Image (cartoon, rainbow, N blue to C red):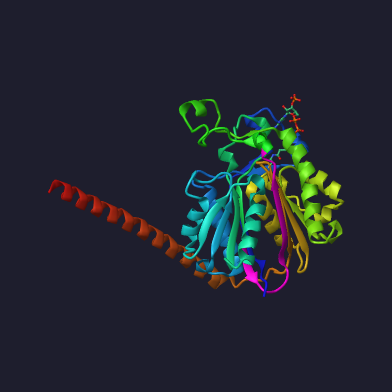
Amino acid sequence: MPVSAHVVGWGYYLPSRRMDNETLEKQIDTTDEWIQERTGIRERRIAGPHESTATMAVEAAKAALQCSQLDPAKLDLIIVATITPDFIFPATACLVQDAIGATQAAAFDVSAGCSGFVYALALADQAIRAGSARNVLVIGADTLSRFVNWQDRSTCVLFGDGAGAIVLQASELPGGVVGTTWGCDGSGWELLYVPAGGCRQPASAETVSNGLHYLRMNGREVFRFAVGVVPRVTRALLEQLNMDVGDVDLFIPHQANARITAAVARQLGLENERVVDVIDWCGNTSAASIPIALCHAIETGRLKEGDLVVLAGFGAGLTWGAAAIVWDRVPTALPRGWLAFYYRWRYRLAAWRSRLRRQWRRFRDAISMRLHKRWREL
Ligand code: COA
């Protein structure tokens, strides 16, 4: 029996710290009017000092798992889409795996800019169809506030931090993820990138003093690329499914700029009721933007059973991707009390397990060092 991947849980996390346009007005030469008119953004969330891509991804994962009522130990795979990982290595997905106690899961990151979530979703779907995984946690998480130059008004007004996650599960029933497509034009890598910190220009006092660890962007070219590629990739996906725009019940593009969303919707002939636009309250959260927008659409009752939802991403690379999902999981009222209690204990146990394993490794290392020293002294 062929299996398909069904969305059985979802959740998102936004840092509590809000930064509105008025706050930015006090820091740089900009105005609330310019930002709202040119981008549609009113405010964005900024990670606090104790937050990171991994901590936000963990919170989104916990919400998605609780929604799916799946035990973390049943996960086979965790994919985190991010361009702002906690470390160059190991992958942020490994930190998530440890924090939620997903003891049976493989874990890795996907770096595909703001298309990352769609890329990760496509990979998860393929792993499920191939039979190598039954339960996959797909997360999009980014902390771009740590990579923007807060003096550069052309970029710092755009981005916000956050994380969104879904749980995909194998099922013999039809529906779920019905199609995915992706692509890349690497000739555009210079349009959106961070010059230093990689092996080409490792971080040094000089790179930092020259501000090379900050994000660089050619906004106008990225805008042009987005408006061209998103309608194209969406039509290509629908064609692959023998469908057309009329079949789409809800369209969720990457949330980069309200003008991009409006231009894409216009080209596709989609009216506002079929398009999700949440950029005004969270800004561009990069790989997290599509799952956050999806969760918001669910919360506000915009998805009904049987609806066809199309996700479309674009971003650094240049990359793009789209996914079509037949929505077959209606949100049910969860028995929140005991479930929340169960998960709380599950994560506490995961934290103890992690601490114990790390301490055991330190102890074992110290003993072997001592034995080694003794042996050399003999
Ligand atoms: N406040 C006030 N003025 C600003 C400003 C700000 N925050 N940022 C730029 N400006 C100014 C520019 O300096 C320029 O002034 P000038 O004409 O005197 O040189 C003017 O506004 C117009 O700049 P321009 O870059 O042409 O603006 P724009 O209409 O293209 O809007 C972006 C700029 C960045 C909002 C827009 O290009 C965009 O959204 N691009 C896509 C970016 C994106 O989505 N990136 C992520 C992809 S995943």
Q: Residue at x 46, y 58 (%)?
A: 98
Q: Foreground residue, 95 or 229? A: 229
**Is residue 301 shown to the viewer in this render?**
yes
Q: Residue at x 60, y 73 (%)?
A: 335
Residue lying at the far left of the rendered structure: 378
Highlighted range, magenta:
166-186
Is residue 24 within the magenta segment?
no
Q: Residue at x 51, y 56 (%)?
A: 96
Residue 142 sits above or below residue 323 on the image: above
Coordinates of residue 195 in the picture (x, y in percent): 57, 32
Q: Quadrant of ligand 1?
A: top right
Q: Quadrant of residue 130?
A: bottom right
Residue 72 sits above or below residue 319 on the image: below
Coordinates of residue 97 in the picture (x, y in percent): 49, 59
Is residue 169 within the magenta segment?
yes
Q: Foreground residue, 286 or 321? A: 321
Coordinates of residue 34 in the picture (x, y in percent): 75, 33
Most frequent secondary structure within the magenta stretch:
strand
Coordinates of residue 94 in the picture (x, y in percent): 49, 55
